Amino acid sequence: MTSTTLSQDVINSGDTAWVLVCAALVLFMTPGLAFFYAGMVSKRNTLVMLQQNLIGLGIISLTWFAFGYSIAFGNDRGNGVIADLGFVALTNIDDAPKPDLHVVTETVAIPTLAFFAYQLMFAIITPALATGAVANRLKAFGWAVFIAIWSVIVYAPVAHWLWAPAGWLTKMGAQDWAGGMVVHASAGAAALGLLIVLGRRKVRPNRAPLPHSVPLVIVGAGILWFGWFGFNAGDGLQANGVAAQALVNTQLAGATAMLVWLVFERYREGHSTVLGAVTGAVAGLATITPAAGYVSSWAAVVIGALAGVVCYLALGLKRLLHVDDALDVLAVHFVGGVFGTLCVGFFGEEAINSIGRDGLFHGGGLTLLGYQVVALASVIAYALVLTLVIAFAIEKTIGLRVSAEEEEHLDLSQQGMSAYQEGPTPPDPAADGATVSGAPKPLEPGNTLYLVTAVLDSAGAAGVEREVLAAGARRAMLSEVSVTTASSVDQMVRGQKRTVDVTPRVRAEILTPAESLTNVRSALSALGDDLVEMTVVPVESG
């Protein structure tokens, strides 16, 4: 692209406002992704998944400010591989080349800081995509160190290759509108590298994850879809026809992929699910990302339909690779980004965007497709190898993987709390209307107490709190749990048949003084077959 001289003071207020709004939309995608993933994991690991996604808002904001932006969009060192550190901590930012901020038209006139902010949001969400693959396995501090390093030495150079005018893949002719390679392919390669280093989950490694909160998944998917309009429509850095085309293409591809996924899900699994609907939509949104500003509306529909098929079938990729991809990041984001990048080589149309190229279906031959293949291979290889090195080094030093014991309840081990607090249930009223004498009693400091934990059949749990309080317990808390049983049912989760051998139970956690322990145990034992198990542990009151 030929650069022209443009003063930093000459800006287009409309384009600037559009880019800033799009930056906010992309930022909003990070909590959306956090909800999307958190709803799909166990309720005991909800807070940890939320933190793993949100921590990048703090860490990567600073790494991008300090080094990342300069490496990605500073002055190229002459080889197209990496930029210099001339803009470290945004120093000399007024000297940034204008309008050669990005691979866009020469009439772009926005402040460099607006471009910095927009690109920052992409840097934040990219490594977060990988957390779904290694759900229930990451140490908090190890992950924080990983994303700090990865965002600087993996993401920033890849962004330079494809989104800086002097990047070597840009000059070769490869095209990536909004991050099929820079975001999705690199994050997918990172996910694969992390899966190799961290291995399979120790707790139920072969069981498909059962979402603990499908509504939370839907909320997250809705936020992602909404934010994706800024993700794809803002990359031209102008509020113009190309932005409108990219926005429409985003909607069409996501909608089509959702419907196709539902059809395949019903055909292969016997039913269509809301979880399948949002998974298909996200797959379509990821797939159209590299092509959104380069293809026509009809092409977006075709790409979305193909994405629904390809990404659904790619759910089996983790079995082929023998990796424990918990939330199917490889199928949805990695395959989606790779396939969408290749689609640019087929459906690209210069008439849609003057900086685009004609793909195979528009008379461009195989040239653009060849560029896309070379770029994909380069990005995937670089991101995978560097991820392996970083993850292995962290695992062998400060540690990146949690222990098997911690996997079951990461929220408690890492956060010291749970996402869902169960308070004590009010005692059942007495049959004759009299006041129940077994109300909770105050704890007496210094006395030895016993924590009695009982797992009960749901049918027999009614009235148990009143009984143990009447027997002398000081506190009683009931909560719903699922435990392994001899019976089992088959369920389909994201295209994979799993035998689910859990059934709902009620857990009673009871605090009782020593003098009442025998009476409390007798009250529980009186439940007969409704008492599944009971444990007693001494504790000290504060």
Image (cartoon, grey):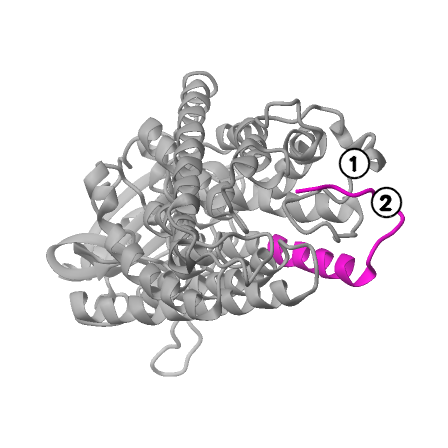
Q: Which residue was labeled with disc 2?
A: 8
| SS category of the residue bearing label 2 | loop
Q: Which residue was labeled with disc 1?
A: 96
Q: Which circle's residue, 2 or 1, is located before the other in the chain?
A: 2
* Crowd rating for badge 2 (residues with CA inside 10 Å; few <14, some 14–19, many 20+): some
> Is residue 430 left or right of 83 when viewed as pictured?
left
User: Residue 386 location in percent, x, y?
Assistant: 45, 25
Three-letter code for the amino acid on which mark 2 is drawn: Gln
* Crowd rating for badge 1 (residues with CA inside 10 Å; few <14, some 14–19, many 20+): many
Disc 2, disc 1: CB below 8 Å?
Answer: yes
> Is residue 69 left or right of 53 when viewed as pictured?
right
Q: In this figure, what is the number of numbered marks?
A: 2
Query: Closest to the observer: 461 or 71?
Result: 71
Res 443 visible: yes
Res. 378 image quadrant: top left
Whether residue 410 is situated above or below residue 344 in the rendered picture: above
> Is residue 192 left or right of 127 when viewed as pictured?
left
User: Residue 495 location in percent, x, y?
Assistant: 23, 58
Range of residues picked out in magenta: 1-28
